[in-house]
Image (cartoon, rainbow, N blue to C red):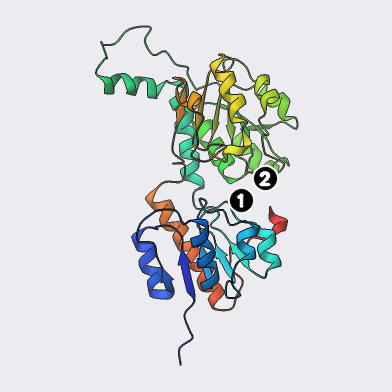
Amino acid sequence: MPAQRLSVVVTRRLPDAVETRMKELFDVELRDDDARMSREELVAAMRRADVLVPTITDQIDAGLIGQAGDRLKLIANYGSGVDNVDVATARQRGILVSNTPGVTVEDTADMTMALILGVTRRIPEGLAVMQSGQWGGWAPTAFLGGRVGGRRLGILGMGRIGQATARRARAFGMQVHYHNRQRLRPEIEQPLEATYWESLDQMVSRMDVVSINCPHTPSTFHLMNARRLKLMKPGAVIVNTSRGEVIDENALTRQLRAGELAGAGLDVYEHGTEVNPRLRELPNVVLLPHMGSATVEGRLEMGEKVIINIKTFADGHRPPDLVVPSML
């Protein structure tokens, strides 16, 4: 007699190939549209499912986990970050949490470089002129940006994405600097020709470009606060493809409006979709709708990891991408 298939609830639409494979393997509930589940819908799903597959837009906090049913044994997050899930509370309830690490490293590093180029070469300003039909032709002093070659790039967070960004930056002729909780091993640091700064304050005060590539944790919340942003050079640029909460967005907006920073490129925001309207008005700011990991290949690989985690759990083994509180 075949084993009973796991009941799996997915909170958002996933790529067709991923959903098709899930239907083959599990008793899966999929979304008809891509609207986010309400809190009430999430509670109901967690009461009837063996496995919940949320995304970063679903806040699975202690209150929700406290209302989960006895059936729920795995939260298989579709995303590399898990700051949307209260992992500690889940584990206390006997619920495992898994994620999808590593698959979007190259994609996010590509977008980091795109933002650096977009801001320093004023690409959105040029695009806006072309789309408006107002372009009057080439001029020697029009749309003058800055050359990225030779500039100092300070990477805040030298994990896999930070290192991938460093490799790209070196190819563009940038000087790579970084601040990290721990210095990289020589065999990693030396090929990147990266300079380690123990003091974040000293690093940001000397950089031409600062790239945020660290996760959001209690210790990194507003790591780039008003005081630290003011340490940056007036001609410097800051980009963020990691987590919006790392930068004090109001302080950043004030500094950009005052001309105390040359520009910013953001793919993530402190308050999710509620972007400061004053930030949107600035011509020297490139804003993207969280596109850093948005490639077809990346989304499919994320789905494959979710499926492997659920299938391994169903077979009675530890999910390969299990998240434990000590990792956070």
**Which residue is painted at 58% across and 40% down in the image?**
162
Q: Which label is found at residue 211?
A: none
Q: Are marks 2 and 1 in contact (CB under 8 Å)?
A: yes
Q: 37 above or below 6?
A: above
Mark 2: give few (<14), some (14-19) or many (20+) Cα within 10 Å: some
**Residue 261 image position (x, y, % from top left):** 57, 18
Q: Amino acid at mark 2?
A: Thr
**Which residue is painted at 46% across and 93% down in the image?**
1
Residue nearest the observer in this picture, 278 or 256: 278
**Which residue is painted at 59% across and 19% down in the image?**
255
Residue nearest the observer in this picture, 221 or 110: 221
Q: Residue under circle 1?
A: 83
Q: Which label is found at residue 217?
A: 2
Q: Secondary structure at mark 2?
A: loop
**Residue 182 image position (x, y, % from top left):** 73, 42
**Residue 232 image position (x, y, % from top left):** 64, 20
Q: State the image quarter where residue 251 is shown.
A: top right
Distance, label 2 to label 1, CA atoms, is: 8 Å
Q: Amino acid at mark 1?
A: Asp
Q: State the image quarter where residue 300 is shown.
A: bottom left
- Check the image and name the residue furthest to the front: 40
Judge left or right: residue 136 versus residue 143: left
Mark 2 or mark 1, which has the lower sequence index? Answer: 1
